[in-house]
Amino acid sequence: MADAGRPRNGRSPDRWQEILEAASALFYAQGYHATSMQDLADAVGLQKGSLYHYLRSKEDLLFPLIQQTLQGYVDDLEAIAGAGGSAAERLRRAVTAHVERVARFGDMMTVFISEGRHLKPEEQERVRALADRYRQMLEGLIREGVESGEFRTPDPALATLAILGACNWLPQWYRPGGRAAPAEIAGVFMDLFLKGLEPRS
Amino acid sequence: MADAGRPRNGRSPDRWQEILEAASALFYAQGYHATSMQDLADAVGLQKGSLYHYLRSKEDLLFPLIQQTLQGYVDDLEAIAGAGGSAAERLRRAVTAHVERVARFGDMMTVFISEGRHLKPEEQERVRALADRYRQMLEGLIREGVESGEFRTPDPALATLAILGACNWLPQWYRPGGRAAPAEIAGVFMDLFLKGLEPRS
């Protein structure tokens, strides 16, 4: 987050990053809409008046937080896809990292679906570019597997969207401390994506 | 939609159903937020003033439309799951029907994610009950397959959520008239869910 962390008119960049992190935690714990500027001020130990030196409203956090969240997914996948190992092993690591991120930052995904239209056009474009980059890398990994004979699918692009959708739907049902931990969820998902429901004879 | 279609203080139930259908079409074509009461009045050939006899604002349409949409999914799946055929064949029909519905009414899913918090608590509960009923039926179908030996998975509940997520994520990327038709998308998804990416020797 080079953009979000830069000094802004003499205000402390550390404090700005601290506000972003506190906002991310609050949005996750109680939801974007239920979080007030007062909650945010309390969380970072500022008077509400001082918080307004950093942002006019919580809407100002939408773009930096959505961008930071997506950038995290992209960074993970870049590291995983570029590392060694079979396509199946890298896909397993990618799905595990994705599920773990959704479990940790889930609300930003729902916030993006519901509030994304409030972003400026150039912000929407940057968010879209990051999301596209992620999808293309995942598709590239699946295509690599198909080319090496490790995978088969009639349509790598649509298979990618199915896998992405399964992972991105998590915030709609996942609750921390629930029956299954993220690594276990990723394991069952990968079993489905690699082996399918039909038993192998 | 017995509730939504009932006569309301002498207002025409046919007209109310007509408004629901027009709203559904408009929300799908241009999105919930971009649709005005004027658009809606134009679509059903009413003066804006007359439209207000039926609803105070488009928020009044949220619950009936979300309920109607979910009830459609539940009705489809009840018919499919209860019919004859192998578990794989019924799952294929269920996924196809689901993808076709999302492709047709996709925006209501996004609207529910973003606007669901504006529903009254008892409305949220009814929506949740319908969504639960759907998920349980799909899980029941997968469990049936596991019990008969037709399917295998380490966790039918999580496998169900993966399949559901893949289908429900469609509105985030599907565009009518795009590269793949709903039946084709469902076919590739089912290939992934039944056979997996790893080739069978």
Image: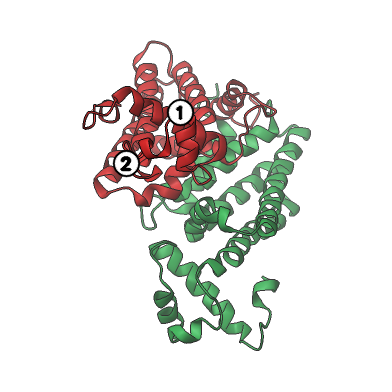
Chain colours: A green, B red
- B128 over B177 or under it: above or below: below
**Chain letter for the residue marked with disc 1 in the picture:** B
Let me know if marks 2 and 1 both belong to one chain. Answer: yes
Instruction: Tell me which residue sits at (51%, 58%) in the image.
Output: A108
- B171 over A104 or under it: above or below: above
Residue flagged by tag 1: what amino acid is it?
Answer: Gly
Residue B153: x and y in percent read 46, 33
Residue at the far top: name it. Answer: B84
Residue B149: x and y in percent read 42, 21
Residue at the far bottom: name it. Answer: A10
Instruction: Tell me which residue sits at (32%, 47%) in the image.
Output: B119
Quarter of the rendering occupied by the N terminus of chain A = bottom right
Residue A172: x and y in percent read 43, 47
In this orientation, which residue lies closer to the viewer: A196 or B63?
Answer: B63
Residue at the far left: name it. Answer: B9
* Visible residue check, residue B111: yes
Quarter of the rendering occupied by the C terminus of chain A = top right
C-alpha distance separating marks 2 and 1:
34 Å
Dot 2 falls on a residue whose secondary structure is helix
Which residue is identified by label 1? B45
Which residue is identified by label 2? B128
Residue flagged by tag 2: what amino acid is it?
Answer: Arg
Query: Residue B60 falls in which quadrant of the image?
Result: top left
Sequence-wise first label, 2 or 1: 1
Instruction: Tell me which residue sits at (49%, 86%) in the image.
Output: A50
Residue B196: x and y in percent read 59, 30
**Chain letter for the residue marked with disc 2 in the picture:** B
| Circle 2 Cα neighbour tier, 10 Å, few/some/many (<14 / 14–19 / ≥20) | some
